[in-house]
């Protein structure tokens, strides 16, 4: 497993629920990081998801667009994050769009599980303002990204164009990545690692984009082969405008990667053992963002009204919607008492015992929700050396081999 040199890019706050077997849950309800009340972050604004309501057909996710982990500072960006008071509507029955492709627009195109906005690969500017050669946000705005690879738009909307590295442990190549968000067509978005084969076999591998830099010497044609008039040619490929500076410098090459033109595939995931279409964040071999970063230029599915376009993201929650309460929804956890932690408090050595299923992974999270230690196992009895951790309160997020997740608090004294 690859280890990251900093704490800030590890898993952030955990979902405030104890999970039963994944197949028995609706991940569109259970995947959100819900603020239990009173937790604030940047500028004293409430963090993460404020509430999740659901009907038979839709889920309504309300958030401030401020994550629970530290964000900022931002270089060469005068914009500062502000409370967006969003309510996004996500269908519970996503379907493939078999008509004309729906391009991902500027602004939010989906939402991460902590209520923060997802933007597409473009920065909203184009060469000579013609809308032909559109600038890649990572290239042109990357200097203004904070350590979590996010920044604020002009309206104060904090967002990510690329992998939200503080939201999940993006370097872990030993387990299937977490479900980290939803596109506005209702299909889930996962981190960078998945089962090698779409049927859930073949071990874990990094999902590779099928978009490749074109082998062009000038910018006189588009990726689909269209020959442009001279007045629509792009700039020369040089130090100021290197290959990759514009979205049109890339072309989709079927079979060159693991993912389709939308940056997704139909496959089995831990949350969808029967299979689902899913998008994947894409990273290169150096674990840096790889185009198209999250979604491709167009959605795979049908997009509902209300989430995209000017003044969007403020849907009205219908009167018949039910509040999702992760602690009292009746989604009871199986065998919650079959995990034991001792001694608690601990002076440095913590034992975790499972009385039925082996422990697969343990994350130790500090009081800010940061992952300060992660270990992988295949045993029912696990010991963890915590002597290097400062005295304080922690939580152990324990994942068993059958996909159950339990969260147990403990104190290091």
Image: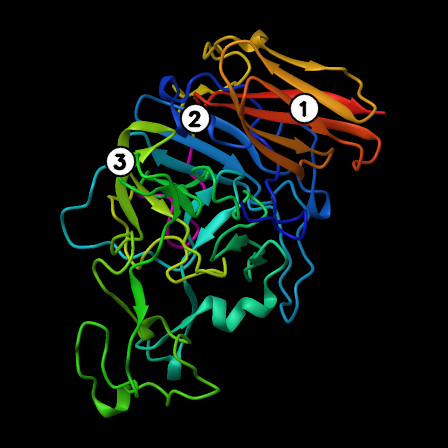
Against 256, residue 377 (above or below) is above
Q: Which residue is mark 2?
A: 29
Is residue 313 among the parts visible in the rendering? no
User: Observer-nearest residue: 357 or 335?
Assistant: 357
Characterize the local packing of mark 2: few (<14), some (14-19) or many (20 or more) Cα atoms within 10 angstroms. some
Query: For the point 46% across and 9% down, which residue is it?
Result: 330
Disc 2 from disc 3: Cα separation: 15 Å
Q: Of helix, strand and loop, which one carries label 3?
A: loop
Query: For the point 46% across and 37% down, which residue is it?
Result: 175
Query: For the point 32% across and 43% down, which residue is it?
Result: 196
- Taking the view exactly as shown, the residue that stands out farthest to the left is 99
Displayed quadrant of residue 102: bottom left
Left/right placement of residue 303 relative to residue 110 reads left
Q: Report the span colored magenta.
A: 305-316
Q: In the rendered picture of this protein, how many numbered marks are placed on residues?
A: 3
Q: Of helix, strand and loop, which one carries label 2?
A: helix
Whichever of callouts 2 and 1 sits on the residue coming sooner in the sequence is 2
In x, y percent, where is residue 36?
A: 63, 25
Is residue 52 among the parts visible in the rendering? yes
Disc 3 from disc 1: Cα separation: 43 Å
Disc 2 from disc 1: Cα separation: 33 Å
Against 30, residue 3 (above or below) is below
Q: Which residue is mark 3?
A: 94
The stretch drawn in magenta includes residue 319: no
Whichever of callouts 3 and 1 sits on the residue coming sooner in the sequence is 3
Whichever of callouts 2 and 3 sits on the residue coming sooner in the sequence is 2
Left/right placement of residue 119 relative to residue 372 reads left
Characterize the local packing of mark 3: few (<14), some (14-19) or many (20 or more) Cα atoms within 10 angstroms. many
User: Observer-nearest residue: 97 or 401?
Assistant: 401
Q: Mark number for residue 383?
A: 1
The answer to whether marks 3 and 1 mark residues whose Cβ atoms lie closer than 8 Å is: no
The stretch drawn in magenta includes residue 313: yes
């Amino acid at each position: 497993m690859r280890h990251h040199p900093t704490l800030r890019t590890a898993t952030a706050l955990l979902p405030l629920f104890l999970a039963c077997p994944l197949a028995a849950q609706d991940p569109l309800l259970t995947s959100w990081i819900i603020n239990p009340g009173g937790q604030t972050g940047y500028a004293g604004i409430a963090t993460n998801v404020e509430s999740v309501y659901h009907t038979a057909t839709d889920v309504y996710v309300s958030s401030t667009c401020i994550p629970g982990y530290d964000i900022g500072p931002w270089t060469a960006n005068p914009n500062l994050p502000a409370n967006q008071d969003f309510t996004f509507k996500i269908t519970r029955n996503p379907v493939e769009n078999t008509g004309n492709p729906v391009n991902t627009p500027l602004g939010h195109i989906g939402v991460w599980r902590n209520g923060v906005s997802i933007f597409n690969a473009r920065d909203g500017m184009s060469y000579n303002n013609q809308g032909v050669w559109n600038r890649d946000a990572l290239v042109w705005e990357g200097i203004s990204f904070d350590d979590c690879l996010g920044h604020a738009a002009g309206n104060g909307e904090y967002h990510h164009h690329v992998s939200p590295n503080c939201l999940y442990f993006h370097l872990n190549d030993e387990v299937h990545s977490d479900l980290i968000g939803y596109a506005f067509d209702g299909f889930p978005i996962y981190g960078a690692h998945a089962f090698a084969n779409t049927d859930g076999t073949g071990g874990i591998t990094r999902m590779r984009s099928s978009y490749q830099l074109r082998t062009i010497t000038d910018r006189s044609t588009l990726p689909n082969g269209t020959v442009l008039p001279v007045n629509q040619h792009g700039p020369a490929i040089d130090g100021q405008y290197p290959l990759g500076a514009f979205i049109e410098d890339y072309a989709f090459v079927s079979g060159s990667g693991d993912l389709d033109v939308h940056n997704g595939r139909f496959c089995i995931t831990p949350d969808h053992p029967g299979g689902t279409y899913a998008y994947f964040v894409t990273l290169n071999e150096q674990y840096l963002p790889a185009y198209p970063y999250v979604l491709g230029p167009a959605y795979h599915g049908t997009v509902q009204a209300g989430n995209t376009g000017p003044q969007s993201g403020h849907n009205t929650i219908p009167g018949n919607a039910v509040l999702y309460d992760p602690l009292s929804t009746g989604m009871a956890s199986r065998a919650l008492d079959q995990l034991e932690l001792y001694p608690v408090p601990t002076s440095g050595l913590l034992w975790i015992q499972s009385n039925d299923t082996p422990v697969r992974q343990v994350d130790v999270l500090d009081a800010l929700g940061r992952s300060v230690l992660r270990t992988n196992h295949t045993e029912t009895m696990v010991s963890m050396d915590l002597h290097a951790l400062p005295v304080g309160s922690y939580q152990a997020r324990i994942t068993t081999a059958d996909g159950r997740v339990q969260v147990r608090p403990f104190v290091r004294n």
